[in-house]
């Protein structure tokens, strides 16, 4: 067996499993946009790739399925290695430790941090399983690319057994400042593992700077060269802007490259779909159903960090403050119910449903319902039709690593003069300055922003959207992929140079 030159380590499998007459079929994800398709796109640039994920099993450490499978889809040929995890392990590792302890700290919600239920030994054990699988599958000169916070300890375990490995890590979430991050009782262990990487990637410079600050505070790392932040980022004046960013840090004789570059969306793919007859019909149907009302859309999942509560309260204030808008606007809210049964998410879902009912009951009538709520995932091809038809996309997370919804809306508008209302605390705000920025913690500012979006003159809406579209089309998912591949090339060249130096010595 030839080992892989690129190993992607991510908790999710890169496809959907569908039972067809008792036989499992592996189908591409329904959404052709987002993290999983973006990562799968890298397999077309390497000789052999492997994706390492988990799959639920009845007995710990025993797979009642084929652990290694070959996939051949539109992204090319690659292997998937599935780690067996019991329902108990999944609950402990993902639903409790990752979501109840780590998630609130990453998003700067320390009062939501739940330490008591955490089983850190299980978290370590699962991370070690992922690391062992990566070591087994990766060639000596492979890039092992680990994704997201729930696999924080994987780099340390890889480095222990494979000291010459080239390890990259990408954070899809925010990375908080030291005063918040250091609430975690396992902070040293986490940082020591991340310092085993060769490349650490973040969406925006602020998150890279926050990590550098944490590493300096806990381990006294030496900060390397600092450079001025350039396009596509706003370098000053915004809540998440940074004028300069550290490019690397030095620790125990090693150099760790820090990279800040956001994942883009795929405007070409979105607009190819919207040019189809069926999509055009769907857009027409949506607009016909809405009539002369203005359509507002907001898309996310049930999560206290997503700002759904603040949005619904703001919409209630809007209809109370401006009763002339009744029957003239409609909000389509996609707030996907969580699969996990935790108190925090259950409470968030109940609050959303309560507020939707209250707003509809307070402001609606026999012929007009102010809010259409969907708690099921809307297929991506249908969703972009709503983006095309919408007048306003209202995206007010209290904190977000990036937020692809904002970019997808801009891509789908494609010449339409819609307005994007975007939280200052979404990572995408650092690269989309022509959105109507809002502070979701402030009632007054939320009110100002939605009023501005609804009342903005047509010429200004068009000018803003033109600049937003240019940004989204320039810094798209393909640009991000090329950027990352450039970083990987540098890692491989460094590996080859080290081997040459060792041979010469």
Image (tube, rainbow, N blue to C red):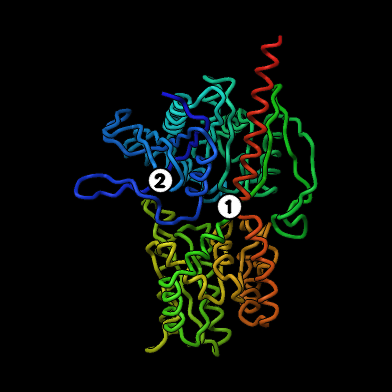
The disc, 1 or 2, on the residue closer to the chain's N-terminal end is 2
Where's residue 176, x and y in %?
Answer: 63, 46
Please say if 240 is above or below 413: above
Where's residue 475, x and y in %?
Answer: 65, 55
Which corner quadrant of the image does residue 144 belong to? top right
Give residue 141's mark. none
Residue beneath the point at 59% across and 41% down = 183
Q: Nearer the viewer, residue 220 or 139?
A: 139
Q: Nearer the viewer, residue 422 or 133?
A: 133
Position of 182 with respect to 102 (left or right) is: right
Label 1, on which residue? 477
Which corner quadrant of the image does residue 200 belong to? top right
Label 2, on which residue? 73
Residue beneath the point at 69% across and 67% down = 467
Question: Farthest left residue?
Answer: 21
Q: Nearer the viewer, residue 471 or 153?
A: 471
Where's residue 391, x and y in %?
Answer: 56, 77
């Amino acid at each position: 067996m030839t080992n892989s030159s690129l190993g992607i380590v991510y908790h999710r499998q890169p496809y959907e499993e569908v039972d067809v007459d008792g036989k499992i079929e592996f189908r591409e994800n329904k959404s052709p946009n987002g993290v999983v398709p973006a990562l799968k796109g890298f397999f077309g640039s390497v000789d052999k790739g492997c994706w390492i994920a988990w799959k639920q099993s009845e007995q710990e450490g025993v797979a009642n399925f084929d652990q290694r499978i070959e996939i051949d889809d539109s992204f090319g040929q690659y292997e998937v290695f599935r780690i067996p995890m019991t329902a108990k392990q999944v609950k402990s590792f993902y639903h409790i430790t990752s979501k109840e302890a780590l998630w609130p700290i990453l998003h700067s919600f320390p009062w939501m941090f739940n330490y008591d239920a955490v089983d850190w030994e299980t978290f370590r054990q699962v991370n070690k399983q992922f690391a062992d699988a990566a070591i087994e599958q990766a060639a000596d000169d492979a890039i092992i690319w680990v994704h997201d916070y729930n696999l924080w300890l994987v780099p340390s375990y890889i480095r222990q057994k494979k000291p010459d490995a080239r390890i990259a890590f990408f954070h899809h979430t925010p990375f908080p400042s030291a005063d918040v991050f250091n609430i975690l009782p396992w902070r040293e262990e986490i940082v020591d593992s991340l310092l085993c990487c060769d490349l650490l990637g973040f969406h925006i410079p602020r998150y890279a700077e926050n990590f550098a600050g944490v590493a300096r505070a806990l381990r006294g790392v030496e900060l390397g060269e600092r450079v001025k932040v350039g396009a596509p980022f706003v370098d000053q004046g915004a809540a998440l802007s940074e004028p300069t960013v550290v490019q690397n840090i030095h620790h125990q004789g090693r150099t760790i490259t820090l990279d800040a570059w956001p994942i883009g969306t795929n405007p070409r793919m979105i607009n190819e779909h919207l040019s189809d007859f069926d999509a055009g019909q769907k857009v027409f149907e949506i607009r016909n159903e809405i009539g002369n009302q203005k359509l507002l859309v907001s898309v996310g999942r049930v999560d206290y960090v997503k700002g759904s509560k603040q949005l619904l309260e703001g919409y209630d204030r809007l209809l109370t403050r401006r009763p002339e808008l009744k029957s003239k606007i409609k909000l389509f809210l996609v707030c996907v119910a969580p699969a996990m049964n935790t108190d925090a998410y259950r409470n968030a879902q109940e609050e959303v449903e309560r507020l939707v009912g209250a707003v509809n009951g307070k402001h609606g009538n026999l012929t007009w319902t102010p809010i259409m709520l969907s708690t099921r995932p809307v297929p991506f091809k249908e969703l972009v039709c709503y983006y095309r038809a919408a007048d306003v996309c209202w995206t007010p997370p209290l904190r977000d690593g990036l937020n692809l919804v904002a970019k997808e809306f801009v891509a789908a508008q494609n010449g339409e003069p819609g307005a994007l209302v975007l939280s200052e605390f979404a990572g995408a705000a650092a690269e989309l300055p022509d959105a109507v920025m809002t502070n979701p913690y402030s009632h007054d500012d939320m009110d100002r922003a939605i009023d501005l979006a609804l009342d903005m003159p047509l010429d200004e809406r068009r000018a803003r959207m033109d600049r937003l579209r240019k940004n989204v089309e320039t810094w798209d998912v393909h640009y991000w992929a090329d950027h990352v591949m450039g970083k990987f090339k540098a890692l491989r060249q460094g590996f080859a140079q080290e081997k040459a130096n060792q041979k010469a010595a």
